[in-house]
Every structure is written in structure tokens, then in C-alpha cells.
Amino acid sequence: MQDDLSRKQDDELISRTQAGDAAAFDELIVKYSPRLYGLVYNMTSNHEDTNDLMQDIWSKAYRSIAGFRGKSSFYTWIHSIGVNMTINFLKKRGRRHTLSLDDIDSNVQNDKEFIELTASSTPVREADLSELQKRLNEAMQKLSHDHRAVVTMFDIQGMPHADIAKILGISEGTVRSRLFYAHRQLQNFLTEFHS
Amino acid sequence: MTDEQLSALLRIKRFEQPAPQYFDRLLQDIHRRQRAELLRRPLWKIAAERVQTFFSEHSMGHLSYAGALATVLVIGLTSIGLLTSGGSLERTSAHPQLAAIVPAAASEKMLNLAQTKPEHVLGPQSLPTAPASYESGYHQPRYIIDTRPASYDPSSAFKGL
């Protein structure tokens, strides 16, 4: 997932941060925030919560980076912090789930893949994709936190099983089984909507 | 709905990103938060850091060791002192009668400060009495040097004189 060059750059930025160069840490924030945002947002489905969590995650990372020894990549490390903090947040939030104000972002509507999907003659198109996306968000909220995390990382962010296993600290087999179960749940929910 | 359709639908969600300027603002927010966290740190942490900075700025490595040793000594002595006073309190509390007498005696002492004539707190009945055998003279006082001192013996060197 992460190439050697990127990892070397990260190692250098981490060393500089550990030596007290705060600007180096800013570079890490700029580099990883978009991906991290996607992970947190797709788990919380709320922009405000995501914004708060992003600050919490980076603050924690900054406090803990002195102890980072490079056993895993920074990418894995920061995603682990992100997932764990988001899951803890969701547990505290309980069942008060709030979907984002705009269930589908305006950015998505203009996305190339989105346009292609709506233009193709698939059953998805007939079912009004916007409504389907809304339903999908609702279905995602019905998954358990652990299953939602796996779906977010694999299907939405395109991470390989091995990386997800490292981030969550579970075996690849468990990742696959959670994915299978989560897909079934999502399909059932969306099929109900179709019918 | 097939797996492919579900995957395609989920893939679209990766583009749900905020506007690019959001990340600039996020950086500013994180900086602001870090500054706020610095102000919220406990006083002892700030003090310890200042001491550390002072020693490192003045390159007083040997003094820092001495300072650390002195700190350990002070902390040790203080804790011993606290433990000792805690122990005496515990002992007092273990004997409630004693605990009742001590403050009473102290308060009496305070009240009697104006009196010029000293007063015996303990009566004669509280003093230990010697056994009757001592008074009858049965036990004679025993001295450590019972024998005659050596200087009293006539010196052999002066026998001929």
C-alpha cells in the first residue's frame, strides 16, 4: 500500500519531529489528513464529529510520537490511532447516530466515477443513485463499529487485507470474515430497499 | 444487489471529502489546540521542565547530578519525617487512654503558665518505692574495687633502702 519512498520520507519526518521540529509533524498532518478524514467520516457519518476527532487524533499522535520506534509504518500507526479513537467515540456516542447534513457530498455528485455509474444502464441507476447512497449510509450505521471499520478501510479506502489486519491488530482471516458478514448485511438492507 | 454493485457503491464514498481549504484550517485548529494544551499542563510538569531547561542551557551537567541527589535527599528526609510523625500519631491512636491524657496534660500546662510556683504533676504515690529489705540494711552497698589498690603494696625495688 505504501511505497518505500513514501516510507523513507515518513521516517525522515518522524525523526525530525522527534528532534523537536514541529514543522515536520505538520507535513505528516498534511500528507495523511485526507485519508484519515475519509476513514473517520465514513465511520461517524458526521462532519463535525469527524473534525473534532481529527484534532483529537493528531494531538494524541503528537504527544505519542516520541515513543514511535518504527516497528510499523507511520501510515499503519496513525490509522490505528484513528480507528481506535473513532470506535471509542462511537461507543460513547451510543445510538445517537446523526447522518451528515448532506448525505451525499456535493463533491461526489461531480465525481467522474459517480457520473459513469449513473450513466450506465445498471439497476443501480434506475433506483436513483442519490437515494441509494442515502440508504447505504443508513445501512452502514446499522453495522457494528468493528464491521464498519473493516468495510470503510477495505471497500471505501481500498486498503489490502494485510494492512487492515495490522491496523486493527487482528488476523487477516478475521478481516475477511468480518467483511463477508458486513457485505451480507449491507446487501440485505439494500435489497429490501430495492424490492 | 450483487457484490460488484455494492463494491461500486461503496467505492464512490471515498470521494466524500471536504473542500481542500478544510485541511488548511485543520492545521491551524491543531496548532491552536496544542497551544491550549500547553497552558493546561499541570504546574509540577512546567516547573520540572523549566528546571531541566535551566540546567541544559547552562551546561551544568555535574550540578544537575548534585541537584538531583539533593532533591532525592530532601524528598527522602521529608518522607521519613512524615512517616515518623505518622507513626507517633498511630501509636497515640492505638492507645486511646494515652491520647486522652496527652492533650489534657498539655492544656493544663498552658493554663498553669501564669503560676510562678512549680507544681508536681506526679504525686508521691506514683513514685516507685524501694523494697523493705533495702531499708533494713540487709543489702550493703558493694563497691567495684574491693581489693586493695596496687599502689599500697610496698615496692620490691625499695626493699634494700
Image (cartoon, helix red, strand yellow):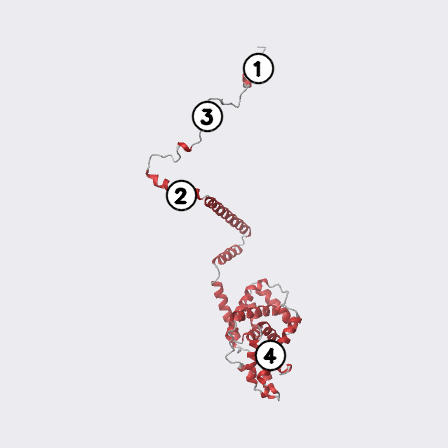
| Callouts 3 and 1 on one subunit | yes
On the image, the x and y values in percent for residue B30 come to 51, 69
- On whether disc 1 and disc 2 are found on a single subunit, the reply is yes
Residue highlighted by disc 1: B155
First-in-chain label (1 vs 2): 2
Density class for disc 3 (Cα within 10 Å; few <14, some 14-19, many ≥20) is: few
Q: Do labels 4 and 2 share a chain?
A: no
Separation (CA) of disc 1 from disc 2: 68 Å
Comes first in the chain, label 3 or label 2: 2
In whole angstroms, how far apart are the C-alphas of marks 3 and 4? 106 Å
Distance between the alpha carbons at the discs numbered 4 and 2: 78 Å
- Mark in the foreground, 3 or 1: 3
Which chain does the numbered disc 2 sit on?
A: B
Residue B137 point in image, percent of width and height: 47, 22
Q: Is residue B133 above or below residue B41?
A: above
Q: Distance between the residues labelled 1 and 4?
A: 124 Å
Q: Which residue is more in the foreground, A81 or A172?
A: A172
Q: Three-letter amino acid code at disc 3? A: Ala
Q: Distance between the residues labelled 3 and 1?
A: 46 Å
Callout 1 secondary element? loop
Q: Nearer the viewer, residue B148 or B126?
A: B126
What SS does tag 3 mark?
Answer: helix
